[in-house]
Image (cartoon, rainbow, N blue to C red):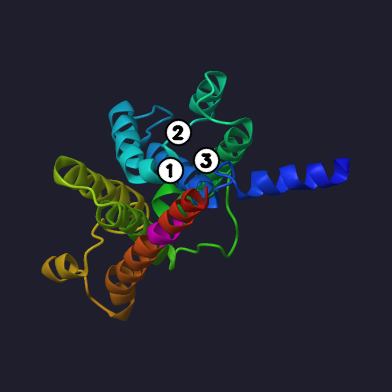
Amino acid sequence: MAVKVAKTDFKKILNSEDIRLGAMFAELIGTFVLTCTILVTSTDGTVNTLIAVLAYLIMWLVISQLSGSHMNPAVTLGLLSVKQITPVKAMGYIIAQVIGAILALIIVMQFLAANPLAAGVTPFEITGLTDQSWLPVLSQFMGALVFGFGIGSVFLGKKQGFDAAFTAGGSFLIGLLIASIGSAAILNPAVAIGVNAFTNNWSTLVYAVAPLIGIAIGIWGYKALLWEVTSTKAKN
């Protein structure tokens, strides 16, 4: 009998709002983008506090409907202490936040390792992951992905007025910062035509194909997370 009760309790936890993969992935993405932005804009180990605060505000708006926008284990634990979040959910959030920060460190440092202008400044260098020739493509794709995720938040989250403008413009800013690691910060094929960025077939891949794919995946990614979060709430 005790075994049946234990199984029932475990099933309730899995089906409850405590286990929402969409919310956990949102925390991972939010912490990842915040960490990336801080790494990219820091100089000589000094954090650009204005950019860090701006990135936090933007990501708060982007993922607030998905997870509540913690992006910080200390915030999660603080809310847990006043019973605003359950222990199970808090543990999931913290794990997601730590993974997001570690991924940001590895990816940004790897991009820097592949950047000839930043040679020798990073302890991370994964051979073959991003060589110098693919760096512009991947940086444009990553920046566009972040921008697309923000656009998804605006339109699918039905934001309006200042919230919509700030979220869209802020996501674009963060996307440009990430893209600038390995390419010209554009993220717009039409603008790329205007600034004469298309000089060969390779530049077409960098400034047209990568942004188109990245933005589309970002929007669909937000839609998938929003669906998972809202469907879990509906079950409860």
Secondary structure character of the magenta stretch overall: helix
Residue depicted at 16% across the width and 69% down the height: 190
Q: Nearer the viewer, mark 3 or mark 1?
A: 1
Q: Nearer the viewer, residue 188 or 206?
A: 188
Question: On the picture, is 102 further left or further right than 38?
Answer: right
Measuring from the top left, give residue 132's x and y in whole percent.
45, 63
Q: Quadrant of residue 80?
A: top right
- Callout 3: SS: helix
Q: Nearer the viewer, residue 193 or 163?
A: 163
What residue occupies the far top of the structure in this picture? 82
Q: Residue 70: which disc?
A: 2
Question: On the picture, is 34 further left or further right than 13?
Answer: left
Measuring from the top left, give residue 124's x and y in whole percent.
58, 47
- Quarter holding the N terminus is top right
Residue picked out by circle 1: 30
Q: Earlier in the sequence, mark 3 or mark 1?
A: 1
Q: Which stretch appears magenta? A: 221-225
- Inspect the image, locate mark 2, and give the three-letter code of the amino acid beneath it: His
What residue occupies the far left of the structure in this picture? 194
Determine the CA span between mark 3 and mark 2.
13 Å
Contact (Cβ within 8 Å) of mark 3 with mark 1: no
Question: On the picture, is 121 further left or further right than 201?
Answer: right
Residue picked out by circle 3: 101
Q: Residue 208: which disc?
A: none
